[in-house]
Image (cartoon, helix red, strand yellow):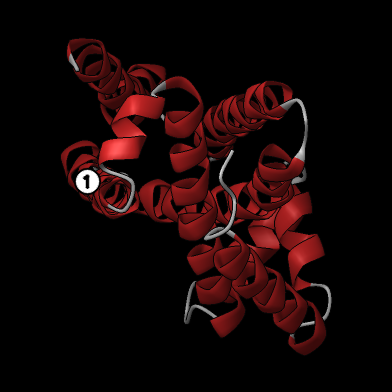
């Protein structure tokens, strides 16, 4: 793989991670643990409820860059002819596509909150989505580096998809956990889950198969 231009974003991401680790001691560790520890996630939610810390914004920036790089690497591996023709266009398209997914997911979540009258659950889940996204960026970064410099990039591409899938499943379980803790009606919980997570994924898969 041609990795020359990727060295610059790799250095930037590494510097940002080092900055967060130095400036906000323990925050990265808490974000990663929040994916499997409900207590830590709940404490982070309460802390971030009033104002989002700069460390969270930086990690979200890392998430966006890591995903864009991963999409580029997957495209380069499986669609080399397209990447050769539209090399610099793919990261731009990936950025706006990712931004669209993030914003649309937030909008769907907000609308669902109003429809099902579960503002508190929706707000907490939105914060948890941010925690999972921040964790995804941290996990994907070393994977993207290994994809670029390993002799077996396919293995690490599969690892990247595995990490994304595991975090997605954990995110669904977190939503169920929040719903059960608030004793939400099971029917409402199912409809909310379908609206916020399952239906958007089905449409995304359908759209992907048409490309």
Q: Position of residue 109 (x, y in %)?
A: 28, 44
Residue drawn at (42%, 52%), measured in percent from left and top? Answer: 126
Determine if residue 183 is in view.
no
* On screen, residue 209 above or below 93: above
Find residue 123 and report its image quarter.
bottom left
* On screen, residue 194 above or below 72: above
Q: Position of residue 130 (x, y in %)?
A: 50, 56
Q: Position of residue 116 (x, y in %)?
A: 23, 36
Determine if residue 8 is in view.
yes
Residue drawn at (70%, 27%), measured in percent from left and top? Answer: 159
Q: Position of residue 157 (x, y in %)?
A: 63, 28
Residue drawn at (62%, 34%), measured in percent from left and top? Answer: 167
In the displayed structure image, the side of residue 50 where residue 34 appears, left or right: right
Find residue 23 and report its image quarter.
bottom right
**Count of labels shown?**
1
Nearest the viewer among 93 and 117 is 93
Callout 1: 10 Å neighbours few (<14), some, many (20+)? some
Mark 1 falls on what kind of element?
helix
Nearest the viewer among 175 and 142 is 142
On-image quarter of the C terminus: top left
Residue drawn at (68%, 55%), measured in percent from left and top? Answer: 138
Label 1 sits on residue: 104
* On screen, residue 103 above or below 59: above
In the displayed structure image, the side of residue 123 where residue 1 appears, left or right: right
On-image quarter of the N terminus: top right
Q: Residue furthest bottom?
A: 23
* On screen, residue 71 above or below 61: above
């Amino acid at each position: 793989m041609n990795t020359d231009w990727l060295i610059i974003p790799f250095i930037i991401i590494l510097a940002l991670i080092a900055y967060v680790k130095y400036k906000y001691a323990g925050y990265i560790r808490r974000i990663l643990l929040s994916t499997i520890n409900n207590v830590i996630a709940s404490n982070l939610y309460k802390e971030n409820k009033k104002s989002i810390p700069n460390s969270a914004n930086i990690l979200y920036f890392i998430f966006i860059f890591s995903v864009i790089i991963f999409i580029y690497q997957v495209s380069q591996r499986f669609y080399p002819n397209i990447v050769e023709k539209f090399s610099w266009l793919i990261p731009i398209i990936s950025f706006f596509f990712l931004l669209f997914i993030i914003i649309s997911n937030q909008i769907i979540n907000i609308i669902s909150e109003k429809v099902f009258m579960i503002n508190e659950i929706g707000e907490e889940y939105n914060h948890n989505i941010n925690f999972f996204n921040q964790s995804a960026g941290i996990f994907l970064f070393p994977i993207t580096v290994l994809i670029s410099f390993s002799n077996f990039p396919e293995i690490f591409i599969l690892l990247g998809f595995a990490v994304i899938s595991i975090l997605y499943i954990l995110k669904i379980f977190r939503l169920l956990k929040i719903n059960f803790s608030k004793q939400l009606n099971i029917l409402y919980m199912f409809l909310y889950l379908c609206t916020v997570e399952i239906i958007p994924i089905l449409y995304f898969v359908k759209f992907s198969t048409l490309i």
